[in-house]
Image (tube, coloured by chain):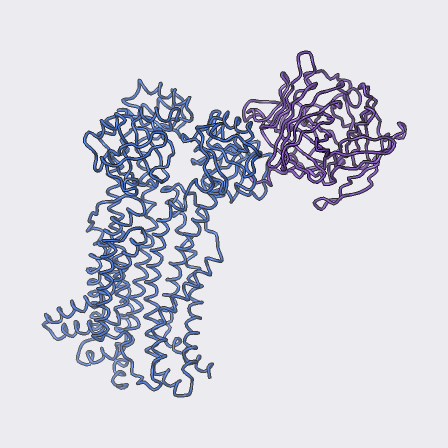
C-alpha cells in the first residue's frame, strides 16, 4: 500500500473525525479506559501492556560518550495504539505497534521506524520474562531473580545505516511521576499513567556508517499509557529529561495549547520525587532552527524559580529531526546556568 | 491564383459528392479499424501494468514458496530476523454475485510506493474490513453485505482488502500466499537461505508476465487492424486515382493559365491532408466507438485465456488519437503518392482525354504477375525456413499479397476463356467488356479477395480449433464433480467424507516452477483409469502410464513440448528439487499459456511435501446425490463445488469469447471490402455511359443493361470468391500450423467446413449485390435523353 496511507495511520486510527493534536492524541476516548487518580501502580504487571487503554509507550533515551571522546544520543521507543480496547489472537488483534529508533551524533542524526500488527507475534510486550519487541528490535529484561524487570535491560535496534546494542543497568528505584503515577496533562484534567526509571548506567556499542563505537553513559526510561493524554486544543509538547552532575534528575514538560500547561518532577539521587505543579517550570525558547521548512525551537531557557534553577540548553545536534511517518524533534542536549549536566529533549507538533 | 486553383479543384468534389463520400468513408473506415484495434491493445496493456503493479508489486521483490503457501510463523520469523517483508494473502472467493480475486494486504508493513494509489483511502474502514474494487467489479458483485468502495486503481476482478478480512473471506488458516520485500532493508541481515531455506526470493519484474503471455494475442489484433487498414486504403486509392483522372482537363487548364506545377501539386497535397484530417477525426470517433463496443469481449477473452484483468470500460488516450491521425495521414500519402507523382511528371499540355487510370497494359500486367510470383516465392521460403511469430505473420502477409496481386491476372484469364466460348453477340460483348473494365475494378476485387480469404482462413482456423477443443474437453473433463477445499484441514475432512461415497478421488496438487526456462507448473497425477483411458498423448514411450506411475519420468504439455523442442524417450526435463526426469510423452493442453509437467502423485509428494490440495476431481455414478451430500451433510458452500456440465460450460464460454473479437473484425473487414467494391462500381458507372450508350442504341433496353451490369458484378464477385477459397485454406493452414504453434504452443489439425463457405459465399454475393445495386439502378433510371446526350457530346 502507498506510504501516503501509512502516514496518516496513527492519526486515522483513533477516530474518523479530523485529526487533531499530535498523532491523534487529542481525540476522544470512547470505549477505552480512562486513568483514575489514586489507582496504585503495581509491578511487574504495569511494565506490561494495557490494551484497554488507547495508547502506550516504552521509551528509552541515553546520553552517551564514546571511547573516541565524541558525544552521542540514542532513543528507542515502542508505541502501542489500539483500534479497540481489547486484545485478540491473529489478525483479529486491534493492537497496532510502532517502533522508533534514533541515533544522534554531532554531525548526523539517524532515525528508523517499524510497524506491526498485534496478535501474530511480530510485535508486542510480554511481562514475564519482560520483553518488548517489534521485528528484530527489542528491549529485553536481563534482570536476575528478585530484581525488578527494568533493573537490567538489553536494548537493540538497527536501521539501514545505523544500529545499536546497549545494556541498561538501573542504579536507583523506579520513580512515579505526577500524583503517584497519575500525571495530569491539561487544566481540564486529561491525564495519563506515567512512571520512569531515570537512573540507568548504559554501556554498549553503536554501529555507525564509519564503523562500530563503544560507548557508555546514562539512560532514562519512561512508561506512559492513557486513552487521551492531551486536550483537544493542545497541538504538541516540549519535554526534557535532565541528569544533573550532582546526581539529581528532573523531568519537565509544557503542553502548548490555548493555555500552556506545564508539569515536572524533581528527583533526588535516592529517587525521592517532588511533583512540580502547573506554572512552576517556565520554558522560554531562545533560538530556532529551520528544519524541513519548520521553525523548531532547539535552544531553551528553563526556569524553576522555587528551586533556584535557571538553565539554558544546547542540543548536541540541532537537526535531530525524526523524519518518520510521525515526525518530531528528539535529541540529546547539554545544559548550563545555575546547574549543569546532560539530558534529552523531545518536541512534537512543530 | 492559388485560391482560384483551390476553388476549381474543390469544385470537382461538389459535382461528385458520391466520390467525395467514398474517399472520406474509406479514410474514416481505415482509421476507425486501425485505431480501434490500437485502442484495444493500449487499454489491455495499461491494465496489465496496473495488475502487475498490484499483483506482483511492480518493482518489488517477493518471497515465495513453490506451493504458493507460507506459514504465517515464517513471516513473523523473517520479521524478527530484521527482514522488512510484508504479507500478502490472495485467493478466489465468492462475493455477491461473482467470484473475485481477494487480495489481502497488511497496510502497515506494505512497502512504500507499491500497490494502488487510492484517491481517498479510508484507512480505519480498511482495517475494519472495507474492500476496494474497480467500479466494474462492484457492478459484477452487485448487492452484498460486505462494505466496498470504488477504486479505479484496483485491477478488474480483484477486491483489495486488509489481510484480516482476506483471511475471513478465504477461510484461510494461519498462512499467507507470499511476501513483498521493502526496498530499504536494515544492515547486516542474515541470508534467506539460513532463515528459511524453503522460501525463494523472486527479483522484481519476474512475477506475472502478462505482457509476454498476451503478446501474441495483441499481435493478432494488430495484424487484423493492419489488414483492415490496408483494405480501407484500397478505397482511398481508387477514389484519389479517379479524381485525378477526371480532373486531368482541369489540371491542363490551370497549368495553361500559368499556375506553377509546384503550386498545383501543393494544392492537391493540401486537399489530401485536409481530407485526411477530416476523415481521420471521424475515423477516430468511429474507432473509439468500435473499441468501446469490442472491449468487453476482449476483456473477457484476456481474463479467460490468460487471467489478465482488463476492465471493460475504455479510457480516452490523446496519444492514441494522435497516433491514429498520423497513421491516416501516412496512409493517405501512400494512397495518393501515385497520383501526385504522375501529376509531377505530366507534360503541361498533355492530352486531357481520360485514360484508364490503372493501366491494363501488358507490361503492367506482367509486372504485377512477377511481383505476385516473387511474393509467392518469399512465402514459400518463409514457410520452409522462417521461425518465430513475426516470420509467421510475414508469411501470412506474403501469401495474401501474392494472391491479391494474382487476382486480376487470373480473372482476366478466366474471362478470356469465357469469351471464347460465348455464342451470342451480347454474351461475347459481356465477357469482353468485363475484361476491359477489369483493371478499373481490380483494386476493389483484390480488397474483396483479401477480405474473403481472411474470412475463410480465420473461420476455418476457429472452427477447426473448436471441433478439436470440444473433443478434447470431453476427454479432459471426465470427472463428474470437482470440489475445491479452502484449506488443508478441510481437504483432509473432505477426503475422509468422500472416500466411502465415491468411485475415485483424484487430488489436484501443483507447485509453481520454471520449466526449461519458462514459467510453468508441476502437477501431481494419481494413477487412475480416468487418465489412462482418456488422455490423448502424442509420441508416448511404450508403457507410458506404468512408467509415469512408477515415477520414472514426466508428461509435458504440448506448449512446453513444442517450445522447448522436447522429444519423448530421449530428452529430459529439469524439475526443481528433483533434477532431470525423462520426458515420457506430451498431452494437448489448450487454453493454458503456461508450461506444464505432470508427475506421479507419490513422486510429487515425496519431492514437494505439504503442498496444499487445491481441488478434488471426483468420479461418481450419482453426481447429484454427491453434490447434495456435500452441501447438506458436509456443509460445503455451493461456490466450492463444480459439476461436469458447469466446467464444460465455463470452458466453452471462454473459448467462444476468445474468437469473438476475431469474428467481429472479420465481418468488419468484409464490410470494408464491400464498400471498396461499391466505390469502384459507382465511380466506374459514371465513366461507362459512353460505352453503354451504343448498346442501348443497338436495341438493348436500359433495364437489360442494368441487369447485365449487376450480373457482371456477381460473376466477378463469384470468381473472386472461388479464388479466395484456396487462399483462405492456405491461410488457415498457416494459422493452425505456424501462428498458433508460435503464439499459443499447440498445433491443430485442419478440418474443412464447406457449410461455412457456402454461408460466406452467400454473404459475399449479397455484399457484391448491394455494392452493384446503386450503379445498376441509376443506369436503369437514366432516361433516354441522358443516353442520347452521349452521342451529342461525342468526344
Residue B747 occupies quadrant: top left
Of residues B672 and A184, the one drawn nearer to the viewer in this rendering = A184
Q: Where is residue A221 in the image (x, y as percent from the top left)?
A: 72, 25
Q: Position of residue B376 (x, y in %)?
A: 22, 61
Seen in the picture, residue A76 relative to B462 is either above or below; the reply is above
Residue B795 occupies quadrant: bottom left
Q: Where is residue B78 in the image (x, y as percent from the top left)?
A: 52, 28
Total marks placed = 0
Q: Chain A is drawn in which colour?
A: purple
Q: Chain B is drawn in which colour?
A: blue
Of residues B404 and B782, the one drawn nearer to the viewer in this rendering = B404
Question: In this view of the protein, can residue B761 be seen by the observer?
Answer: no
- Residue at 49 percent across and 28 percent down: it is B167
**Is residue B47 rendered to the left or right of residue A32?**
left
Seen in the picture, residue B43 relative to B358 is either above or below; the reply is above
- Residue at 24 percent across and 69 percent down: it is B368
Residue A150 occupies quadrant: top right
- Residue at 62 percent across and 16 percent down: it is A129
Q: Which residue lies furthest to the front in this view?
A: A68
Of residues B309 and B660, the one drawn nearer to the viewer in this rendering = B309
Question: In this view of the protein, can residue B709 be seen by the observer?
Answer: yes
Q: Which residue lies furthest to the bottom in this view?
A: B257
Q: Position of residue B538 (x, y in %)?
A: 22, 38
Amino acid at each position: 500500500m502507498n506510504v501516503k496511507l501509512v502516514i496518516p495511520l496513527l492519526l486515522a486510527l483513533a477516530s474518523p473525525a479530523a485529526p487533531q493534536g499530535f498523532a491523534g492524541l487529542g481525540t476522544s476516548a470512547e470505549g477505552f479506559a480512562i486513568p483514575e487518580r489514586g489507582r496504585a501502580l503495581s509491578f511487574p504487571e504495569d511494565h506490561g501492556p494495557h490494551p484497554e487503554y488507547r495508547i502506550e509507550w516504552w521509551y528509552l533515551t541515553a546520553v552517551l560518550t564514546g571511547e573516541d571522546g565524541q558525544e552521542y544520543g540514542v532513543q528507542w521507543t515502542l508505541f502501542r495504539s489500539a483500534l479497540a480496547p481489547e486484545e485478540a489472537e491473529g489478525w483479529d488483534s486491534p493492537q497496532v505497534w510502532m517502533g522508533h529508533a534514533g541515533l544522534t551524533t554531532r554531525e548526523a542524526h539517524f532515525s528508523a521506524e517499524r510497524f506491526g500488527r498485534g496478535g501474530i507475534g511480530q510485535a508486542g510486550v510480554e511481562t514475564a520474562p519482560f520483553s518488548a519487541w517489534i521485528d528484530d528490535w527489542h528491549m529485553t529484561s536481563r534482570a536476575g531473580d528478585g530484581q525488578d524487570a527494568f533493573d537490567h535491560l538489553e536494548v537493540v535496534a538497527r536501521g539501514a545505516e545505523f544500529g545499536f546494542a546497549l545494556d541498561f543497568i538501573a542504579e536507583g528505584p523506579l520513580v512515579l511521576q505526577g500524583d503517584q503515577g497519575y500525571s495530569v496533562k491539561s487544566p481540564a484534567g486529561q491525564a495519563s499513567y506515567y512512571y520512569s526509571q531515570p537512573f540507568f548506567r548504559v554501556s554498549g556499542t553503536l554501529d555507525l556508517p564509519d564503523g562500530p563505537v563503544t560507548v557508555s553513559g546514562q539512560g532514562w526510561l519512561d512508561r506512559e499509557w492513557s486513552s487521551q493524554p492531551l486536550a483537544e486544543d493542545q497541538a504538541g509538547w516540549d519535554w526534557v529529561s535532565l541528569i544533573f552532575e550532582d546526581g539529581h534528575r528532573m523531568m519537565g514538560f509544557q503542553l502548548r495549547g490555548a493555555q500552556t500547561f506545564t508539569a515536572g518532577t524533581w528527583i533526588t539521587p535516592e529517587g525521592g520525587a517532588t511533583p512540580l505543579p502547573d506554572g512552576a517550570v517556565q520554558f522560554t525558547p531562545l533560538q530556532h532552527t529551520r528544519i524541513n521548512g519548520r521553525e523548531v525551537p532547539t535552544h531553551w531557557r528553563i526556569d524553576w524559580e522555587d528551586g533556584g534553577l535557571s538553565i539554558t540548553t544546547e542540543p548536541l545536534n540541532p537537526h535531530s529531526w525524526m523524519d518518520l511517518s510521525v515526525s518530531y524533534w528528539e535529541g540529546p542536549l547539554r545544559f548550563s546556568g545555575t546547574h549543569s549536566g546532560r539530558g534529552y529533549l523531545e518536541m512534537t507538533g512543530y | 491564383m492559388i485560391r482560384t486553383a483551390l476553388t476549381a479543384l474543390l469544385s470537382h468534389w461538389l459535382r461528385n459528392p458520391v466520390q467525395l463520400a467514398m474517399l472520406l468513408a474509406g479514410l474514416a473506415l481505415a482509421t476507425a479499424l486501425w485505431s480501434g484495434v490500437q485502442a484495444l491493445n493500449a487499454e489491455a496493456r495499461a491494465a496489465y501494468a496496473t495488475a502487475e503493479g498490484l499483483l506482483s508489486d511492480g518493482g518489488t521483490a517477493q518471497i515465495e514458496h513453490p506451493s504458493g503457501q507460507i506459514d504465517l510463523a515464517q513471516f513473523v520469523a523473517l520479521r524478527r530476523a530484521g527482514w522488512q517483508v510484508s504479507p500478502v494473502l490472495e485467493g478466489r472467493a465468492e462475493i455477491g454475485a461473482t467470484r473475485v480475486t481477494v487480495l489481502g494486504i497488511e497496510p502497515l508493513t506494505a512497502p512504500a510506493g507499491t500497490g494502488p494509489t487510492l484517491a481517498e483511502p479510508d484507512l480505519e474502514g480498511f482495517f475494519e474490513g472495507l474492500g476496494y474494487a474497480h467500479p466494474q467489479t462492484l457492478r459484477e458483485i452487485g448487492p452484498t453485505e460486505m462494505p466496498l468502495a470504488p477504486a479505479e486503481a484496483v485491477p478488474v476482478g480483484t477486491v483489495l482488502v486488509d489481510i484480516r478480512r482476506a483471511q475471513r473471506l478465504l477461510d484461510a488458516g494461519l498462512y499467507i500466499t507470499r511476501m513483498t520485500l521493502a526496498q530499504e532493508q536494515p544492515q547486516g541481515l542474515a541470508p534467506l537461505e539460513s532463515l528459511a531455506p524453503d522460501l525463494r526470493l523472486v527479483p522484481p519484474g519476474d512475477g506475472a508476465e502478462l505482457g509476454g503471455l498476451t503478446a501474441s494475442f495483441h499481435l493478432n489484433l494488430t495484424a487484423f487492424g493492419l489488414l483492415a487498414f490496408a483494405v480501407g486504403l484500397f478505397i482511398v486509392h481508387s477514389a484519389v486515382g479517379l479524381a485525378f483522372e477526371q480532373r486531368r482537363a482541369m489540371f491542363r487548364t490551370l497549368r495553361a493559365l500559368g499556375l506553377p506545377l509546384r503550386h498545383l501539386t501543393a494544392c492537391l497535397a493540401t486537399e489530401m491532408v485536409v481530407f485526411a484530417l477530416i476523415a481521420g477525426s471521424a475515423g477516430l470517433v468511429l474507432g473509439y466507438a468500435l473499441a468501446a463496443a469490442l472491449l468487453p469481449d476482449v476483456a473477457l477473452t484476456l481474463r479467460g485465456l490468460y487471467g489478465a484483468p482488463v476492465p471493460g470500460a475504455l479510457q480516452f488516450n490523446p496519444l492514441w488519437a494522435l497516433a491514429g491521425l498520423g497513421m491516416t495521414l501516412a496512409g493517405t500519402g501512400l494512397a495518393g503518392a501515385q497520383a501526385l507523382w504522375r501529376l509531377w511528371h505530366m507534360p503541361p499540355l498533355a492530352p486531357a482525354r481520360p485514360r484508364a487510370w490503372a493501366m491494363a497494359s501488358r507490361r503492367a500486367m506482367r509486372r504485377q504477375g512477377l511481383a505476385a510470383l516473387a511474393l509467392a516465392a518469399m512465402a514459400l521460403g518463409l514457410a520452409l525456413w522462417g521461425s518465430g511469430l513475426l516470420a509467421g505473420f510475414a508469411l501470412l502477409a506474403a501469401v495474401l499479397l501474392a494472391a491479391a496481386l494474382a487476382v486480376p491476372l487470373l480473372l482476366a484469364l478466366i474471362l478470356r476463356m469465357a469469351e471464347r466460348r460465348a455464342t451470342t453477340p451480347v454474351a461475347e460483348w459481356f465477357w469482353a467488356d468485363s475484361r476491359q473494365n477489369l483493371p478499373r475494378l481490380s483494386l476493389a476485387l483484390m480488397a474483396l479477395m483479401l477480405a474473403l480469404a481472411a474470412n475463410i482462413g480465420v473461420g476455418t482456423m476457429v472452427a477447426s480449433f473448436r471441433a478439436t477443443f470440444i473433443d478434447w474437453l470431453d476427454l479432459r473433463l471426465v470427472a463428474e464433480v470437482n470440489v475445491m477445499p479452502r484449506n488443508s484441514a478441510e481437504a483432509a475432512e473432505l477426503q475422509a467424507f468422500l472416500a466411502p461415497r465415491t468411485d475415485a478421488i483424484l487430488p489436484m496438487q501443483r507447485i509453481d516452477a520454471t520449466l526449461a526456462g519458462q514459467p510453468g507448473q508441476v502437477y501431481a497425477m494419481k494413477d487412475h483409469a480416468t487418465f489412462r483411458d482418456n488422455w490423448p498423448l502424442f509420441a508416448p514411450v511404450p508403457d507410458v502410464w506404468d512408467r509415469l506411475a512408477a515415477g520414472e519420468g514426466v508428461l509435458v504439455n504440448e506448449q512446453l513440448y513444442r517450445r522447448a523442442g522436447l522429444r519423448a524417450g530421449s530428452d529430459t526435463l529439469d524439475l526443481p528439487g528433483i533434477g532431470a526426469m525423462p520426458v515420457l510423452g506430451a498431452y494437448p493442453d489448450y487454453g493454458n499459456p503456461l508450461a506444464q509437467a505432470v508427475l506421479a502423485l507419490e513422486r510429487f509428494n515425496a519431492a514437494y511435501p505439504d503442498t496444499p490440495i487445491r481441488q478434488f476431481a471426483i468420479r461418481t455414478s450419482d453426481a447429484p446425490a454427491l453434490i447434495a451430500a456435500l452441501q447438506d451433510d458436509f456443509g460445503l458452500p455451493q461456490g466450492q463445488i463444480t459439476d461436469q456440465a458447469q466446467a464444460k460450460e465455463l470452458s466453452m464460454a471462454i473459448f467462444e469469447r476468445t474468437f469473438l473479437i476475431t469474428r467481429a473484425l472479420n465481418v468488419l473487414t468484409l464490410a470494408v471490402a464491400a464498400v471498396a467494391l461499391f466505390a469502384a462500381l459507382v465511380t466506374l458507372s459514371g465513366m461507362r455511359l459512353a460505352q453503354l450508350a451504343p448498346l442501348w442504341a443497338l436495341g438493348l433496353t436500359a433495364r437489360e443493361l442494368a441487369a447485365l451490369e449487376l450480373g457482371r458484378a456477381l460473376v466477378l464477385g463469384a470468381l473472386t470468391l472461388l479464388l479466395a477459397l484456396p487462399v483462405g485454406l492456405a491461410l488457415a493452414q498457416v494459422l493452425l500450423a505456424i501462428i498458433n504453434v508460435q503464439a499459443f504452443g499447440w498445433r491443430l489439425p485442419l478440418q474443412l467446413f464447406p457449410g461455412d463457405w457456402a454461408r460466406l459465399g452467400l454473404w459475399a454475393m449479397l455484399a457484391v449485390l448491394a455494392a452493384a445495386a446503386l450503379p445498376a439502378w441509376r443506369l436503369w433510371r437514366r432516361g433516354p435523353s441522358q443516353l442520347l446526350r452521349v452521342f451529342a457530346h461525342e468526344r
